[in-house]
Amino acid sequence: MPVLDREPSRDSGGGDGLPKLPLPALKDTLDMYLSCMKHLLTEEQFNKTQNVVKQFGAPGGVGELLQSKLMERRENKANWVYEYWMNDMYLNNRLALPVNSSPVMVFPLQHFRAPIDSLRFAAHMISGVLEYKTLLDSRSLPVDYARGQLAGTPLCMEQYYRLFTSYRLPGTERDTLVAQESSVMPEPEHIIVACKNQFFVLDVVINFRRLTERDLLTQLDKITRMADSKEEHLPPIGLLTSDGRTEWAQARSELMRESTNRDALDMIERCMCLVCLDDPSGPELSDTTRAMLMLHGGGVAKNGGNRWYDKPMQFVVGADGCCGVVCEHSAFEGIVLVQCTEYLLKYMIGSPSKLVRAASVSELPAPRRLRWKCSPEIHQLLASSADKLQRQVKNLDMNVYRFCDYGKEFIKKQKMSPDAYIQVALQLAFYRCHSRPVSTYESASIRRFKQGRVDNIRSATPEALTFVKAMTDGKLRTSDTEKMELLRDAITAQTKYTILSITGMAIDNHLLGLRELAHELKMEKPEIFQDEAFLVSNQFILSTSQVPTTVEMFCCYGPVVPNGYGACYNPQSDHIIFSVSSFLDSPQTCSAEFVKCLVQGLMDIGDLCNKCNSSSNTTQKKQGQTLETHTQTETNWQSKTPQRPADKTESQQSLPQFVLKTPDQTKVEAQTQTPSLAETHALKNGSKS
């Protein structure tokens, strides 16, 4: 039997009153594992895996021993999987944060007529950040409640309180998520403003008074003038944070030799957030271009060095109107990013800036430029980081597409969950592209539980495969009525697995816990975790996330394996925004082709629904309404947790239609090495949720 709390636990380990994460029964997880993998393996592979799993789960065997130890751990910890999950998903990962881990939120293109307009926008946004932080500091943020299945369940709010108080510290083998503790007399709060690859300290509280928007504009104006001073330009140290985590940890150790650098690092690591004032990036600012610029800054020649990737929140304001947020994913999931950014955009719409002017004379102390002392070694490391970032820029194959033929309202009329429907469409798209199913990751929020983050919805179900074969194999001659039944079976299977995941009964966290406990006990790695099926199960070639918004913006992130896709989607009432990423140096992937197959699949499924629902009165079982599926980034990023109500009259700028173009298939050197498949775990937000 699974281990469950009968009554909500009342200690304060990550959410007062929330129950602890349940521990599924070992037999349930092993049976589900086999059922998830059978259709993804050859017959020979599956027969071997069946024997390995049977041996692992045998009475008195290794599995039972590890399960009993996990039960003990559950008794003694607020959340039995949290540390294992955090290390495996993020902190142990050695890949560079941009593209590989950090999801981004892309704002509607802004139309700035003059340089002061972009600074005015930044000052207005900083005011919104300070308002939001006041809510957090006073613990006044309303509790989120689940919608859809098990509606009304309160959700853990712990992640919100890391938005402006944490920092990802690089380590040579494992990073550390540092959460600052507030003291009785906190130092004046500050943000770091990046401008022309230089970093400036902007105090937002001076003499116990919070700066007004006019004051902030004055200070930002001063910063841009200081940044223009060519004589004082220092090397673009921010590039170091875009490197692999081990390389950045080593570079940081070198920087720490100088007290000047230690002081600068301290100011950055303790700041609330970054505001990156970017130079114009080029003439074309389509959705796809803006997504890429948010993910990597455009490299060394553009704004790649105008970042500090270890901070959870980097607000990017481009002089050309390219704006958004870059998120370090280990501190929180995509829903937290969505809620915060929606608050900010609604704040900016609801309290117009009134064209504030910078004060001509200000008694405010000037912002401070952070200084760096760079040894020859640092200069060499900067050159290496710049080169690797440039390779990432050249390698990213991004395609943002707005599907306008229908949106979630049409899907709901079919009495289907929009999320499950889109997941089945993604399975159809991949099969059309590659003629095979693959392990798929869709992050599901487990915030119903104390310190809950995410588990995985394994969307590549046997039922989805049966449906996509019927849709693609002309020899089968399946009738439309039969196809419709298969679609409903696939939607039902996806919905059932989603419910398992959001109620803490899915398999991925459980298998991770068993594996990590064996390692902790210094046991020889059990064969189940060395078996080829386990490698296949954890190579998420399709990493997906739903990140719904009520304000016009969209989320995106990179793939989590070299030969994979990152597929983030934002279902709106009458359209769906898809952000599909892959790597150009993989001969197996092409984002434009995937989007082409996805559009065809959505049209085909829509046509099927229209045909069958207009010509048949077959009783339809009601599928689960929209479920709280937390999709990142995980990315990462994410959840159907209630959004704050959107005023429908708010300026919902429409996103430009993206025209499909086949990307240049020039192969470039891979920007990073992937970790071993056994250790690879999907990063998303989603983000990479």
Image (cartoon, rainbow, N blue to C red):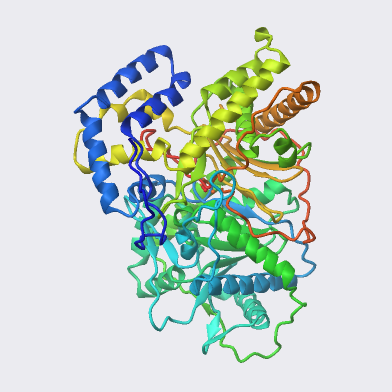
Residue in front for this viewpoint, 531 or 416: 416
Q: Quadrant of residue 514?
A: top left
Q: Quadrant of residue 506?
A: top left
458 relative to 617 in the view: left or right: left
Q: Is residue 340 visible?
A: yes
Residue 277's x, y, as percent? 63, 66
**On the rendered image, what quadrant is the N terminus found in?**
top left
Q: Examine the rendered structure and indicate whether residue 498 appears above or below residue 228.
A: above
Residue found at x 35% / y 47%: 81
Residue found at x 78% / y 56%: 653
- In this rendering, the count of numbered labels is 0
Q: Examine the rendered structure and indicate whether residue 547 appears above or below residue 411.
A: below
Residue 29's x, y, as percent? 37, 31
Residue in front for this viewpoint, 57 or 134: 57
Residue in front for this viewpoint, 149 or 287: 149
Residue in front for this viewpoint, 668 or 160: 160
Residue 319's x, y, as percent? 70, 64
Q: Quadrant of residue 231?
A: bottom right
Residue 659's x, y, as percent? 77, 38
Q: Is residue 432 visible?
A: no
